[in-house]
Image (cartoon, grey):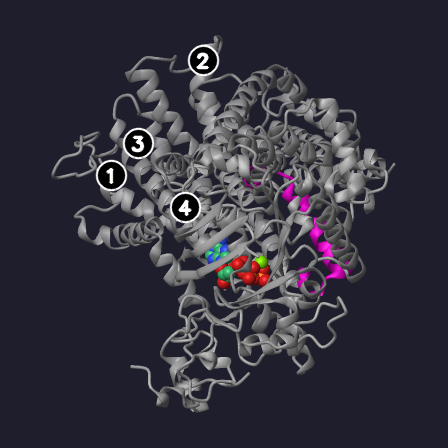
Amino acid sequence: MINDSLFAPLPKEALQKKEKTRPSLNFWQDGWSRLKQNKMSMIGLYLIILIALFSIIGPFLVPYTYQNIDLARTFLNPSWQHWFGTDELGRDVLVRVMWGGRISLTVGLVASFINLVIGVIYGGISGYFGGKIDEFMMRIVDIIYSIPILLIVILLMVILKPGLTNIFIALGLSYWVGMARIVRGQILTLKEQEFALAAKMLGATNRQVLFKHLLPNTIGPITVSVTLMIPNAIFFEAFLSFIGLGVSAPMASWGVLASDGIRAINAYPFLLFFPAFFICLTMLSFNFLGDGLRDAFDPRLRK
Amino acid sequence: MTKQTLLRVENLHTEFRTLFGVVKAVRGISFEISPGETIGIVGESGCGKSVTGLSILNLIPNPPGLITQGSIWWEKEDLLKIPRKQWLDIRGNKISMIFQDPMSSLNPVLTIRTQMKEILQYHTQKTAVEIEAECISLLNKVRIRKPKEVLSQYPHQLSGGMRQRIMIAIAIACHPDLIIADEPTTSLDVTVQAQMIDLLRDIQVRTNTAILLITHNLAVVAGMCQRVLVFYAGKIVEDSAIDDLFAHPLHPYTMGLLKAVPRLTSLDEEPLATIPGSPPDLIALPTGCTFHPRCQFAMQICAIEEPTLQTVKGRKVACWLYDPRNPGRLAE
Amino acid sequence: MALATYLIRKFIYIVIVVLTVATLTFIMAHAIPGGPFTREKPLPPAVKKNIEARYNLDKPVLFQYFDYMKNLIRLDLGPSFRYEALTVNDIIRQKFPISAVLGFVAIIIALILGIAAGTISALYPHRWQDSLFMFLALLGVSIPSFILATFLMYVVGFKLGWFPVAGWGSPAHIVLPAFTLAAYPMAFIAKTIRTNMLEVLNQDYIKVARAKGLPERIVLTRHAIKNAILPVITYLGPLVASVFTGSFLVESIFAIPGLGKYFVSSIYDRDYTVIMGVTIFYCVLLVGLNFLVDISYTFVDPRIRIVKQND
Ligand SMILES: Nc1ncnc2c1ncn2[C@@H]1O[C@H](COP(=O)(O)OP(=O)(O)OP(=O)(O)O)[C@@H](O)[C@H]1O
Ligand SMILES: [Mg+2]
């Protein structure tokens, strides 16, 4: 038990070894480990992957193409031959929904990406330089921000004429203000922190500070915002389709399919059901994921 | 010499279940307070001082926090066993609390009047007119000029010192037997700190209220308290009368704390963290004595077994140096 | 005093926003090939005369622009591009009241149910009430309004027959479209209130209120809910915007003869002057409402008053 030898001094080296340190995780590992604990967002993530696989690989596995017209077989109910039924031109709805997925997901991704680029550059410059430049740039953002985005998109689409590229342009051009604000806010707070000062003292140029030190720290909020932007873009595309400003035939996004389905709702509800189901599922998955990411990357929670 | 006891905390354990693991914030704290006594709690940031104070009032946010063991005796009742309703009669009425940050302690969207009145409304039978008069007299007691005007103002219109005076006024409104003051001066500037301490001491003398004073600042303790509890990593490592503690600290951690305060008479906020090493990780505590990795006298046993609080010459200390079995026991 | 300068500044800002929007619509209208300001186009002669007289298409562009602005300042949005007898002002006067009634009902629904659901969720975090409401809220932000509209119309209106499927005229006609419009903002409000409420419940002053020995009921109603709801006022502007833009679809689907439905059909028709006019109208409306919200916020939250006075 307790004997005298236990009261001998403890050598200092023993202490060093004993001091336990929790493994320090980097930003992504830390966020990822939090995300993994959030069941809903993991479900969202898996669903997104499934939906993407469905849209990308699906068309190769189905013996029809999105433009195969078969006037002898119009408005067929879902069956083993046509899982999702056929539309008014006898085209297979399943393959059209898969193609719709490709288009809608592309719209979501590309529009978010354009946004991201414009928003990060604009907000980064504004926040980094501060002062008069910042004030001027933010006034512009304020002005754009107070105009409902949807109206801007509609106006742009009216001028640009319907079509995929123009949807990218319209969505990309109108949405970045939110992103610019987020980035600027982040940069402003981070700029004051020591590491930016330190980097500057060590002789880094403005551009280096901006891209190497400041932007990586704003990645959390940006990731969240992009994740939530994707379903938004998909929704807007669907909305545009509904008012006749979407992609044009014979291709069809989910939005186009759904708005065609709405017109036939009483006779053939399945024409609306399938595209609507995919739109909702996609939006839901991205929202699940976005909420989880927000919690996982919330800088206030990091220790 | 047997004093009656006002509050007795026995073997209190409080923990927080977080994503990273269980934070054992308080690990078996026992102490008692007699009526009219002023006791200080000192220790580094994060050592469980506030959690102890909050536990006494059952204000630990749950989840994630939970009091897992122990009892808190007040007038022959274990506060941890009484029903919720009874709590309401104790909080603010028998035991009141003053918090660290007066800037965030007052609700920003309510007037001072609303926030003062309510405590009297719930604990006394006074009429509205009497309550209004009482509020004014309370503000006078904490030396606020133009109390009528202040009552109609919102918190943001008042300075930090003013707000803390108001918090003190609220705390003494129902003539409690015990006030828990959790770093009442830390966030104020130096001159205001002195005024606050003055005020508290004055109130204490006049009303004979017991005070549990939680602080970083040993100088504040020196000026106000009869006894001090030194906390380290959720435990009491030394419990001692104030004069003894300053004249002759027993625990190596206390020695370090004292060295960190060069001028005892000044109220300057001196950082305590001049003790080498960093505070322990409460999720993964060091084995044995939690202080041993930073202790200059560390022995083999310190890394193996945690010392308990033992009486040494009428004082209490938790350290192997004073164990009777220690052949090289620090002579005294 | 200070409030006055604040208001004046805000007002100037609004004027700038409106001018910007008007200018943009003008530029856009000129940029459209076959648009209203292209002179070689097949139009009914009466309309063509209207347009040419109205927009001075034979004058230089800059002249046209100032002329256009002058008319805007007189609140004159000009003639329709498609229908000779109509002016944009007439259309708005006729159609907007219907949209306003619908929108108002939707906003009330969204506020009441959203605040209630958010508060309940925050009071029972991670319990079934919370899970249920937050799941519904997620559905609310995830289901596009035109799908929800069609679903409600098909199931509740058509299959169950509880409410009229489409049209306008009786209070029963309002229920389904108003609920559809309310869904998104309601979900958003519920989520916001929950977050705010949880944050407020963590504040020191809540701890102080509990330490005073107040009953939990008072702690919540007096100290927590007001603080949690206040920020929702700032959401009123976007809320109104969401309801009005939502009305484009919802009115079209439920065949409600409001401005939203008309706007969509004028997009189909490429009735450019109506598109421009209605866009400007909505912008002015929303910016104006935002202004009102700002002002009311400064009166409701004591903190803001001081901040503004200080700067
Ligand atoms: N709500 C909570 N959730 C998780 N951990 C908590 C919570 N509240 C306190 N803790 C942990 O409990 C430990 C003790 O905290 P406590 O507030 O008692 O420290 P303290 O001694 O008062 O420090 P300070 O001097 O900084 O006020 C800290 O390590 C803290 O991280
Ligand atoms: Mg504390």
How many numbered circles are shown? 4
**Which residue matches tag 3?**
A272
Residue at 54% x, 53% y: name it.
B53
Between the C-alphas of marks 1 and 4, the distance is: 26 Å
Earlier-in-chain disc, 1 versus 4: 1
Earlier-in-chain disc, 4 versus 3: 3
Residue at 29% x, 15% y: name it.
C160
Residue C173, disc: 2
**Which residue matches tag 1?**
A93
Beta carbon of the mark 1 residue lies under 8 A of ligand 1: no
Which is more foreground, mark 1 or mark 2? 2
Say what secondary structure mark 2 lies in: helix
In magenta stretch: residue C66: no
**Which residue matches tag 4?**
A287
Say what secondary structure mark 3 lies in: helix
Chain containing the residue with disc 1: A
Chain containing the residue with disc 2: C
Q: Quadrant of the N terminus of chain C?
A: top right
Q: Which residues make up the magenta segment? A: A126-153
Q: Nearer the viewer, residue B111 or C174?
A: B111
To the question of a shared chain for discs 4 and 3, the answer is yes
Q: Nearer the viewer, residue B295 or C173?
A: B295
Q: Residues within 10 Å of mark 1 (few under 14, many from 20)?
A: many
Residue at 73% x, 53% y: name it.
B201
Residue at 70% x, 52% y: name it.
A138
Q: Main secondary structure of the magenta part?
A: helix
